[in-house]
Amino acid sequence: MAFMTIIIVSWNAKKYLEECLDSIINHSLSNGTEIIVVDNASSDGSPDAVRDAFPGVRLIRNDDNYGFAKANNIGIAASTGEYVFFINSDVVVKAGCFEKMISYMDGHQDIGVLGPRILGTNGAVQRSCMGFPTLWNSLCRALALDLIFPGTKLFGGEMMAYWPHDDIRSVDVINGCFWMVRRKALQAAGPLDERFFIYGEDIDWCKRFHDKGWEVVFYPEAEAVHYGGASSANAPMKFFIEMQRADYQYWKKHHTAPASTTFLFIRILHHAVRFAGGIVSYPFRRKKRPEALYKIKRSLASIKWSLNFLITPQR
């Protein structure tokens, strides 16, 4: 039995995956560590690169893209570690990260999930925690009140923009690019919900850990770097719509039908506001028109998807 298991789900992110594995091998514990890569039928040579360059890594090749939750569950089934780390393929682990997290988890037996501070490639802190979604939080986001009043907890409760990620604290959700999970807590909460193909599974899982009495904690003493979007960059529009689907899926699972429908209307408002803003600002954004046009199309596609779901909710 390993002391710690590291699970990485990968899909067409070869360059990032190689850098991620290098950082893990350089900074993980010398003994008692197992590393598992679960590849979701990549076509960019990722599996062969892992096989050839990282012989100590256990490679699991899926014959199709099973999504993030199911692929991680396959990794969980193959794992033996007392602590299980779930790390995105586009994350680089910094020195001391594992030792600090393990030490803190060892000293706090009530913690089920621990997340490090996440930095961008420019060294800036990335948001890696959030509050549970509520209708109020969703409305504040739709109307951009969380951006207009970023330091106000009343309007920024979901994205937590009021908090600079500079202290240890219990949070509702640790977002899914880097989790450390205690095996006992995992057994209590159960595996990831495979109905979430990608996105939303992190909110759902953290809620289930809370429901079972385990703390979810942000721990800034340990750090990792996150490139972001390594897999989603392969099909950005598709992944954005998947995010909308996952958000609604979470509401349907954990809230009443009227609340879920209200959330969907708020989400339509959210994208309608951004669609209108994009149309108005487009003529004045000469240097960034391709990006602005993509965001306009993205908002329109999201509105269409939401309206279609209201008409045919069984889909």
Image (cartoon, rainbow, N blue to C red):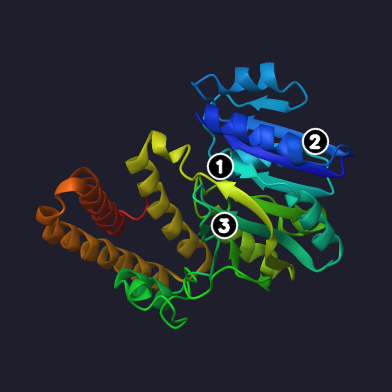
Q: Residue at x 46, y 64 (%)?
A: 251
Kindly identify which residue carries mark 2.
34
Q: Secondary structure at mark 2?
A: strand
Q: Residue at x 61, y 33 (%)?
A: 19
Whole-angstrom CA distance, mark 1 to mark 3, is 13 Å
User: Can I make out residue 282 in this image?
Assistant: yes
- Percent position of residue 13, x then y: 52, 31
Q: Disc 2 residue type?
A: Glu
Whole-angstrom CA distance, mark 1 to mark 2, is 20 Å
Whole-angstrom CA distance, mark 3 to mark 2, is 23 Å
Kindly identify which residue carries mark 3.
175
Kindly identify which residue carries mark 1.
68
**Quick one: which residue is furthest to the left in this view?**
283
Mark 3 neighbour density, 10 Å: few (under 14) some (14–19) many (20 or more)? some
Q: Specify which label sits upstream in the sequence, 1 or 2.
A: 2
CB within 8 Å, label 1 to label 2: no
- Percent position of residue 204, x then y: 57, 60
